[in-house]
Image (tube, rainbow, N blue to C red):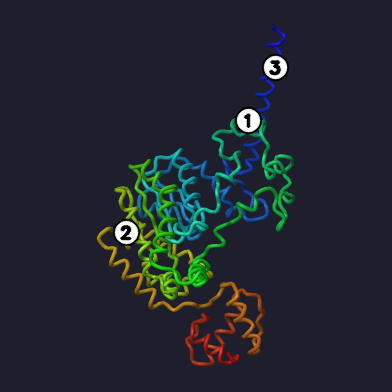
Amino acid sequence: MNSSRSFLKRLMIVYMILLVGVALTNYIIDPYFCYRESSMEKYFSWDQRYSPVWRYGITKQFRGYNALWVGSSVSAYVDAEYLNGIMDINCCTGILAGGRPNLYEKYIRNVIENNELDYIFYEFNVPHWTFTSIGTECDLDTWLPKYIQTKTLLDDGEYLLNRTVTEQSAYIIAGGLWDKVIKPGSYISDIDSIMPLDAYYSTRIMAPRIYSNIYYYGPISHDIIMKDYLNAGMDNIDKYVAPLIEENPDTEFIFVAPPTGAVLPATIYESGYLEEWLDVSEAIYRRLLSYPNVRIILSNLDFDYNTNCNHYLDDGHYEPSGAIMMMDCVASGTYEVTLNNMEEIRDAYVHVARDFEWPFLKINFEGDQVLELQRQLVLLGFSVEATGVFDTATENAIKQIQEENGFEVTGIVFSDTADYINNKCGK
């Protein structure tokens, strides 16, 4: 009996030593950055900044904040020091979730566990909420390794001792084989499901998708849009947004529409479904504003900024000044939508949708339209490589055409320049 107890005691001691040893090893290596950020520039085969798993991990590190900014790629330029200065708060920023409400919810819950938040600044975009494939296709409940959902180092150690570790962690813990973890184009395990998803749904990509979907499926009635799109939006609110708001009544939720430009409403207007889109948007605004601790700031109503094509950083994102504009709107309450000014907001969107000229092409844009433009420039004798990326050589060729033919020299291809090139190429 005593020998059995002695054996069990020794076994438990060995187990605890192993457990603590694995936990300490985990802390030193910290594969998913749950306890401290790695100084590595690369993790796996892509930039670690774009991995939803990595972002989930770092939310565990935040302590001592009273505000959180969670958003998509536009929020990458949100400067905590600037925001803290204009609002007298202590905010943690840079939590990017590609516009997906289910990711936002998990990140927010991680931060709420360790911080008493007075404010949550929540970057939102109506299309992200009304198209289920955009809003929820990265299901962290399925793809997030259980390993980084544990709460403590000892939990992590016990997990590693008793369960199958993800292949990524196994490689790292086995010997820091950074260059052998994943080869580009050869994904192991389920890693393909946690790729930088926000790269696929920029404004310019999303807007034509809405436009083309409408025409692909044929005319869509107002009733169908209100039923399907609105139901998807309300479902996302019910699952991922409303519970957070209701569970944290003392936290002010400020939903901030990013400077997604005039591209989206202009494209939807072109399709003939702007009124339906505005109906869905208004219904979502009203649902959110039914909570006393919610405000909505529509920084995409700053049309002086959003309709200036020089502010486009690439074909779907704005330059860093867009983040400053967002923060200034939040601090001042500018472009706040209320239950009393819905009609004015609606009229403003209609105005910009009708007046904004879309499409256009400029530096850093990518895609088939750019490729066709470059092929035309080659036919016209310009030294341009047809890569599908609007590079400096392409811009210089456009400027030369504009200068020689009396157009405003911008390097941006609007309809006047495009029509001239088409005519010269016999189209």
Name the residue carrying label 2: 332
User: Which mark is nearer the camera, 1 or 2?
Assistant: 1
Amino acid type of the residue tagged 1 in the rendering: Glu
**Rendering coords of residue 80 (x, y %):** 44, 53
From the viewer's perspective, tell me whether residue 131 is left or right of residue 39.
Answer: left
Q: Nearer the viewer, residue 316 or 85?
A: 316
Amino acid type of the residue tagged 2 in the rendering: Ser
From the viewer's perspective, tell me whether residue 116 is left or right of residue 312.
Answer: left
Q: Is residue 99 above or below residue 140?
A: below
**Rendering coords of residue 9 (x, y %):** 67, 15
Tell which circle, 1 or 2, labels the residue nearer the N-terminal end: 1
Quarter of the figure with residue 228: bottom left
Residue extending farthest left: 340
Tell which circle, 2 or 3, labels the residue nearer the N-terminal end: 3
Q: Which mark is residue 10?
A: 3
Q: Quadrant of the C terminus?
A: bottom right
Q: Is residue 349 above or below residue 107?
A: below
Q: Disc 2 versus disc 3: distance between alpha carbons? A: 65 Å
User: Which mark is nearer the camera, 2 or 3?
Assistant: 3
Q: Residues within 10 Å of mark 1 (few under 14, many from 20)?
A: many
Is there CB contact under 8 Å for labels 1 and 3? no
Name the residue carrying label 1: 158
